[in-house]
Image (spheres, helix red, strand yellow):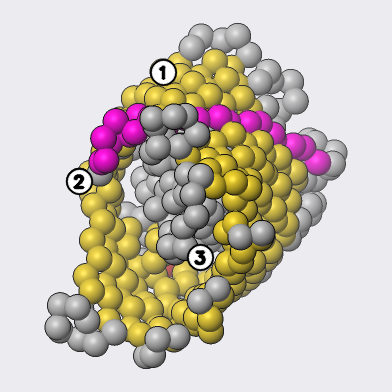
Amino acid sequence: TQHLQSVVDGGRDETTRYGTSLDYVMTLDLHRMGLLPGAIVGVRAESILGSSVNRSARTILPVNTDLAFPLSGPGGEDVDLALTELTYTQFLSEHVALFMGKLNTLGGDPNEFASGRGMFQFSNSDFVFNPVTALTVPYSTLGAGILWIPSENLTIVASVFNTVDASTTSGFDDFGDGWTLSVEAQTRHQLHGLPGGQNFGFVYADDGNYLRITGRLTFEPGVGLEIPRSDDSYALYWSGWQYLWTAEADDSPIDTSNGRPDRRGIGVFARSGFGDDDTLPVEWHVSGGIGGRGLIPGRPDDHFGIGYGYSAISNGRLSGLTGGGKGEAQGAEAFYSIAVSPSAAMSFSAQAYDDVNRRSDTSIILGARLNIRF
């Protein structure tokens, strides 16, 4: 995926960045290969070349999600090659499976109109994952869990993993530096014959070292200023999507992880979440919008999305500089993806986002993205 983005913030000079992300994805179905019944191996490796406008936009979360991960360090250096997923899944029956390995969490909140890892649909992270989980759910980490499918319309996933990101490391040295429990239920339904779905999730992190944003500095003799900290944190979130109209009847299953609407039609989506206001920089979040595919005659594979997101930011009273209270971050994005061929698409997007600093003007981000699947 190749990205070209420009940002104009408060009338300052325009900043343009060009970056390329390469994703190498492989799924080995050992059952179909005749090697091991019910076993699947998943592999994802990634490379990043160039840079993004994430720093220039000065937003609390990335305006270009695809180029923000895998994490490469404070300088945002290129990533030559990072193994961000290597999982082994063993189905014990048609309804229960166990998995373990290096987990990639970015697709953990799938949505028909707002996911796509920042490569295929929206670029801004508000419409890719729920920001209330950003502190406790790392992008890539070691973990294990269980998958339960009690019915065709309900999937429950529970997992435990390291809280420290291991995008460019093995992750084995992170044991003991905090762990996170995640439980999510994904449901499907039909509303007047039109498909929809919802995700409900809860995360709890413990044995960590989180700044208490709402705490106050204390002075310890012989030590100096002490920053209040907490061992644990939590967040709850929900997301949903619903088709409002489709061009034709289709009973085939919908894949919410493939980065595009599976039906020709139009629908709505929404996300919300809240968490521990003592430790999380994003105290609560809501976003929503519309999306669709194939609305222009003769262009059945083009798709689009328009969304708005709002996050309540905890300013805190840690340093006494802000005097407490809450900040906010809000903005919108619109994109249109043109299907060039069955394996290539060209997308154009526009974003408008307010900075957390109320004295800053709105950031305008314009972007173009070429995505090629081999």
- Residue hosting label 1: 16
Circle 2 — which element? loop
Rendering coords of residue 215 (x, y %)? 78, 54
- As drawn, the label of residue 163 is 3
The first of marks 1 and 3 along the sequence is 1
In the rendered structure, which amino acid carries the disc numbered 1? Thr
Question: Would you say residue 152 sits in the magenta stretch?
Answer: no
Quarter of the figure that contains the N terminus:
top left
Amino acid, disc 3? Thr
Task: Tell me how far mark 1 sits from mark 3, CA to CA.
Answer: 33 Å
Q: What residue lies at 48% left-to-right and 12% top-to-bottom?
A: 14
For the point 15% across and 77% down, which residue is it? 33
* Residue 22, horizontal then vertical, whole percent: 26, 43
**Is there CB contact under 8 Å for labels 2 and 1?**
no
The residue that label 2 is drawn on is 374
- Quarter of the rendering containing residue 302: top left
